[in-house]
Amino acid sequence: MRSRNYEADYAEEPSPWTRPGFVLAAALLLVIVALGVVVAVRSGDDDEPGPATPPLAAVSETPAAQPQTTGELPTAVPTTAPAGVTWQVVRGTALPFSDRAGPRDHSDTQAKGFAHAPEGALIAAAQLTSRVGAAAGRASWEPTLTRQFLPSADRDRLQRALEAEPEQPAQPGDLAPLAGYLYQSYSPDTAVIGLAYRAVNGATARWFIVTTTLRWSDGDWKMVAPPGGAWTSLSRTVTDLSGVVEWGAR
């Protein structure tokens, strides 16, 4: 089977292959050319996409599943302990940290940058409640109170109460450890979360639950100061953890 180019190239003069001595060689060459065309066509067909399994290189270019980022956190309140949380002792108590939910910026004295999601609000509640305690020391409670609490008369009262407390930094084991949480309500603007702490005194097991309120303001979760500046107004004692999701350092 001759191609169009073959005929064009040899139209000007008789082909030497038409001579009797070359008839057999010409026939053999035509068979070889025909086989070459078939191979070329079949090779070209292999390059076209089809139902065959894609080459390994294409598979290896598919990115592996990445961990969730803060923007991909669930919008439903967690009914089990959040995954990927680590615990670090900060000023005498273990606090939660999450690559997904925050805090993004933190030091020994302050934590900020929490995810705009239920999990971010939960970690903010645990962080800010501990860091604003008198036992954390003024170097911790003052920047936390002035930067991470919403301005109010109750915040001013809480500040005066803290200023009246003597500096007595807590040691590990002195403070009630976080034992769990329960959401009382949640919306993208406001989160009301109860934090359960195990009492460290007394032979009978008991816990107290502190109700915290946070609001989304200026791109972060901010705490609402307790009424009258006293956390005791938001605290209740329980003898079991019914309805509480257990959560804390192990």
Image: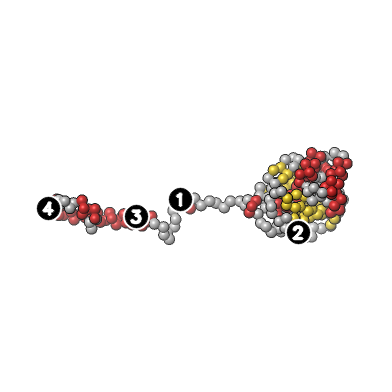
Query: How was the colour assigned to the protein in this rendering?
Result: secondary structure
Residue at 86% across, 43% down? 160
85 left or right, relative to 176: left
The tag earlier along the polypeptide, 4 or 2, is 4
Secondary structure at numbered mark 3: helix
- Pointer 2: what residue? 185
* Of marks 2 and 3, the one in the foreground: 2
What type is the residue that disc 2 sits on?
Answer: Ser
Q: Are marks 4 and 2 in contact (CB under 8 Å)?
A: no
Q: Are marks 1 and 2 in contact (CB under 8 Å)?
A: no
Q: How far, Cα to Cα, is label 3 from label 4?
A: 35 Å
Instruction: List x then y, in percent, for residue 114.
Output: 70, 49
Residue at 79% across, 55% down? 194
Camera sees residue 205: no
Q: How far, Cα to Cα, is label 4 from label 1?
A: 52 Å
- Pointer 3: what residue? 43
Q: How far, Cα to Cα, is label 1 from label 2?
A: 50 Å
